[in-house]
Amino acid sequence: MISVEHLGKRYVISHQRGQHDELRHTVENSLRAPFRWLRGQYKSLHSQRQEFWALKDVSFSVKQGEAVGIIGRNGAGKSTLLKLLSRITEPSTGRIHYKGRVASLLEVGTGFHPDLTGRENIFLNAAILGMPRSEIIRRFDDIIAFSGVEQFVDTPVKRYSSGMYVRLAFAVAAHLDPDILLIDEVLAVGDAAFQKKCLGKMSDVVKEGRTVLFVSHNIAAVASLCSRALLIDGGCVEQSGQPASVIEHYLSKMRMHAGMPVGERKDRRGTGRMRFSNVSFLNERRQRVQTLSCGQDVSIEFNYELPQGAPLDNVAIQIKFAGLFGQPLFACLSSARLGESLTLLPNGSIRCRIPRLPLRSGSYGYSIWCTVDGMLADYVSEAGLVNVVEGDFFGTGKFPARDTGDMLVDHQWSLDIGADNHRTHKENCAIASKTNPMA
Amino acid sequence: MTSFEETIIEAGQPGKQYFRDLWRYRELFLFLAWRDLLVRYKQTMVGVAWSLIRPALTMFILTIVFGHFGNMPSGGVPYPLVVLCGLLPWQFFSTVLSDGGNSLVSNSGLVSKVYFPRLIIPAGGLITGLVDFFISLSLLASVMIWYGWKPADNIFFLPLFVLFAMIVSFGAAAWASSLTVKYRDFRIIVPFAIQLGLYISPVGFVSSIVPQRYQLLYALNPMSGVIDGFRWSILGSQHPILLQNMIVSFAVAIFILFSGIRYFRRAERTFADVI
């Protein structure tokens, strides 16, 4: 049904700001060049260009009616693969061959125009996704019913809530009838009830015998919907097979990966003006620990290097925690708490204190991120894993059930007894004590 | 799900099926043009009336500047008519070029998320341009009735010159849109060129005032051919056309069209990566 042979995609990254206006750079560089040349610092334009293979020598085939889940870390090349399959961009090497009509959902609501009404946008979006006009007319009522925004079909979508917008957009997508469906992370939107509806629709599509390629971070969804999984890493297909075994391999690899010190990681992004060299977790007594416990005061220590050796102004740092399936949980952002930017000195470290760690027992991944002057300086996705054991978060030894979520939040309860009720309660007691000599 | 059509995507072999795809996506083309028309006058106060107000005011100003202050010849035709015959094709050209030039960038969400032959995006400008054009034709008709001027017999040739205008405009839009994706400078260059072009092209004056020996050079501007053709077919033989000028203009127009499409096709392969 789909066969992919030796597929590769090369990007040329230019290390200059603003890649759009190359005309200016062409002019500017030729004007500047004489001066740089005079100062003996002349560098040719081309030395600032780097090749980057987002995908390299990828081959696989998909049979008709198969639902294939594509998993892998951020930046592994999953989305590039979908872009090539859906013909948005051309491959640099290799060949793709398939039969049938393809619909690709790389985003929910592609081509929605805020000034147009819901009705107009349904037509437009469906046409963009490749549905013939006659079919749109035939399925229009179904689409509206599925979206649940009947009352607002003639309202411009800019007045929609974001939830309504997503529901309408997904409703259109759910009524496409392609032979091959390519989906990228679209399930990561909407509320829980809607996500459930989407997953239900997806499994219907799979049951109807359509071929589905599904890129997701939601490993649970891949495990339940797909008959096969592809693990992509570093632009190559690393493993293909039963979802359960591929997912197991992926998770164990992530744990192994997390064992590698942050400073040695190569798969980082950013300008490199600042580089994280290590991240460690400290307990209340400032001792480095491998395992944290829920409800404990925790400090995170970031060590870094400044390759330029000079202090850096305007720095913001963030650490984001996510579950093992990649679902984001919470993040700590330095500028959100301090209200201003940090100044980093060479050979220093930064600490972030989290009072009463709100994570339940389990393993969690974290990504770290640093900007300088608003530009990404260093970013390490899934920089490490941290293990948390159950602790007495509320001081009562009791917890909500485990399936209520991965996080605990401090809170208070109070019983508000209104003034009237209060008196009645007292009177009741008085009455009770009069009538009951035993009280 | 009986007969599946085959698709082959190969590195370095941009679709042999391109023109088949172009035909297959004709519905999307119409939908995008329909969207542009809908959006164009939403939340405006007088809406479609703008298609009349703009040429009417421009006609007024150009008539005063060139006809009264400049005292330009008009071949015995009321000056507002001379201006309007030049203004209609010019406004068509400028709409198609400016809308088309920006079209890829303003539709970058589409370009980076779905596949379709990208050529239909700048081509959508042709439809908006034509709709505007037909609306402003009614302005021309009213001005002609006002002056009691009957259209010449040559009017039957007008569709040919509309086609000529479409060729020039679309060719220019194909160039402008693909260049804008790569060099955002063209967002400034294009409106500026349109502004200058209004004075270089024979919009406010007749091209016969250009000295004889520069006539062929002047004809290199394809819009001069279009505008001369419009005047000839609407106003008649007081505004004769020179055959060799027409041939030069048309040849340039065809060249712009084919080179524009060719450049577009080549640039198109990397649109999604650079936009």
Image (cartoon, coloured by chain):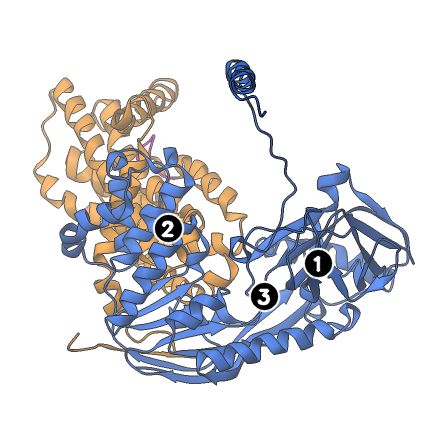
Work out how far the residue at label 1 is from the one at label 3, CA to CA, in angstroms.
16 Å
Considering the numbered disc 2 on the image, is that residue within a helix, a strand or a loop? Answer: helix
Residue A150: x %, y % from top left: 24, 39
Residue B63: x %, y % from top left: 32, 22
Is A32 left, or right, of B202 in this rendering?
right
Sequence-wise, the earlier of marks 2 and 1 is 2
Q: Residue furthest front?
A: A437
Q: Which chain is mark 1 on?
A: A
Residue B48 is drawn in which quadrant?
Answer: top left
What colour do you see for chain B?
orange
- Residues drawn in magenta: B201-206
Sequence-wise, the earlier of marks 1 and 3 is 3
Q: Which chain is mark 3 on?
A: A
Compared to A141, does B67 lie above or below? above
Residue A436: x %, y % from top left: 53, 22
What colour do you see for chain A?
blue
Compare residues A86 and B24 and report the one nearer the observer: A86
Compare residues B16 and A298 and report the one nearer the observer: A298
Question: Per the image, is B204 magenta?
Answer: yes
Considering the numbered disc 1 on the image, is that residue within a helix, a strand or a loop? Answer: strand
Amino acid on which disc 1 is placed: Ile
Which mark, by number, is residue A368?
A: 1
Would residue B247 be seen by someone viewing this image from the given angle?
no
Q: Main secondary structure of the magenta part?
A: loop
**Quarter of the image that includes the N terminus of chain B:** bottom left
Graded by Cα atoms within 10 Å as few (under 14), some (14 to 19) or many (20 or more), the crowding at tag 3 reads: many
Which mark, by number, is residue A194?
A: 2
Work out how far the residue at label 2 is from the one at label 3, CA to CA, in angstroms.
22 Å
Amino acid on which disc 3 is placed: Leu
Amino acid on which disc 2 is placed: Phe
